[in-house]
Amino acid sequence: MQPELNGSLHAPIPLFEKRLQETVGDRRYQHWFRGKTRLTLVGDDLTIYAASPYLATWLQTHFRSAVRSAAEQAIGTGVRVEWAVDASLATRAVVTGKTAAPETVAMSPAPPTASAPAAPADVRPAAAGPTRRVYDLETFVVGAGNAMAVTAARQVIESAGPRNQSLYLYGNVGTGKTHLLEAIGHALRQQAPHLRIVSLTAEAFVNHYTQAIETRSLPSFRSKFRSVDVLLIDDVDFLDGRSGLQEEFLHTVKKLEEQGKLLILTGDRHPRLLTKTSDELVTRFQAGNVARLEAPDLETRRLIARRHAATMGYPVADEAIEYVAARFLRNIREVEGAMNCLQTWHRMTQRRVTQTAAREVLARLERDCLRVVRLADVEQAVCELFRIAADDLRSDNKARSLVQPRMLAMYLGRQLTRSAYSEIGSYFGGRRHTTAIAAEKKVGTQIAGSESIRIGHEMWSMQDLVENLTRRIQAG
């Protein structure tokens, strides 16, 4: 649905605001949204801009369900909600000493008068601020951890056509999967405008399917997704454990395969670790090119930080760049979030960002990034991966299918929590501290010796397993 930037209260943006205000209450809406956020709507992509990463994270944490509900009511079940930072919102509030005036597409714009014509959907006023980011390969920072995935993306773009090899990109959150996926779609649209290209998240696919069932329009739904030339699905792991939805998606994939169409997917883990996904889908995900995106290394984080400062045009000392690159390790979003904070500080103070300033400004952000891992978190991740019950993991059963996961859980409990050996042994079935010590040594030896273990029908190295479990536990 296209937005009406200056429309009636029944246009998508004003209707979304009205529904959100009804859901969260007038007082909370006025306090957290009015004048403090800005909206853009491009197709079914709703982007909510907040003044800082802190505010964006806080709003997501406390109002995610309310925002999603309001967006679906106003725009449709296929809407995709994204959060971004617009530092100018904070700057205007600081400079004027009062709430920033709403922009044309800001939250809670004043209703237009009868004589004010609605602006066309593709028109944006010059002062409307940042628009939705266009992802392309030129803006993607290439490093050691993602070079193969970028090469695979370029290969897809250059050889797009009948019987082209499909692509599955996987990696932890914030490693650039969505950027690459949308960059492929963007390049294909420019290179071959005649291609029918559909790009959406797996959750949006499910929403479309559910809506089709409710409205008895399944033939139309299937025709839409099975007659495309290129289908790009983000976060396909959303289907893991949803057998009925997997069946529908499988038929879509089969149809595209029969027609020689192109399928591009992203997920948070390798297809073989989608343990609740049917073998038919998993094997199809693996049939094409499978490429991993790893967390950015130090040099890549430096490049990301420098490019951000250069693109946004604010002065940053090399020492500040080094500080950010050394402190924010896990993903691209952390680095960009830190740089957004420094940009906001620069616009407020009009001073160059030095290492001292970076330390002071980012101190709170670093504290917010810390996550306390509990033994229960470790237990849950291990049980989900190996598909075993927590009671079995803690039991006295010495079956090989339980002993290895139990040792892994104890090893990770020692590595990721502050628990003593005695606490770890006690938690995992009332065992002695010596058992936890022995488990840690055993897994450490397996990692050092590049040993592998079997999960289902596949062999996995202990190093890969520990890294995968660690990422999942730390990501919550």
Image (cartoon, grey):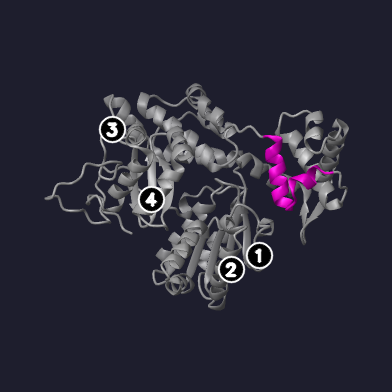
The local crowd at label 4, few if under 14, some if 14 to 19, many if 20 or more residues have their Cα within 10 Å, is: many
* C-alpha span from label 3 to label 2: 49 Å
Label at residue 71: 4
* C-alpha span from label 4 to label 1: 32 Å
The local crowd at label 2, few if under 14, some if 14 to 19, many if 20 or more residues have their Cα within 10 Å, is: some
Are the residues flagged by discs 4 and 1 in contact, CB closer than 8 Å? no
Q: Can residue 152 be seen in this view?
A: yes
* C-alpha span from label 3 to label 1: 51 Å
Label at residue 100: 3
Label at residue 247: 2
Q: Is tag 4's residue or tag 2's residue first in the polypeptide sequence?
A: 4
Q: Give the range drawn in magenta.
A: 374-395
Figure quadrant of residue 332: top right
Secondary structure, mark 3, is loop
| Magenta highlight: main SS | helix
Label at residue 278: 1
Magenta span has 153? no
Secondary structure, mark 4, is helix
Q: Is tag 4's residue or tag 3's residue first in the polypeptide sequence?
A: 4
Quarter of the picture holding the N terminus: bottom left
Figure quadrant of residue 286: bottom right
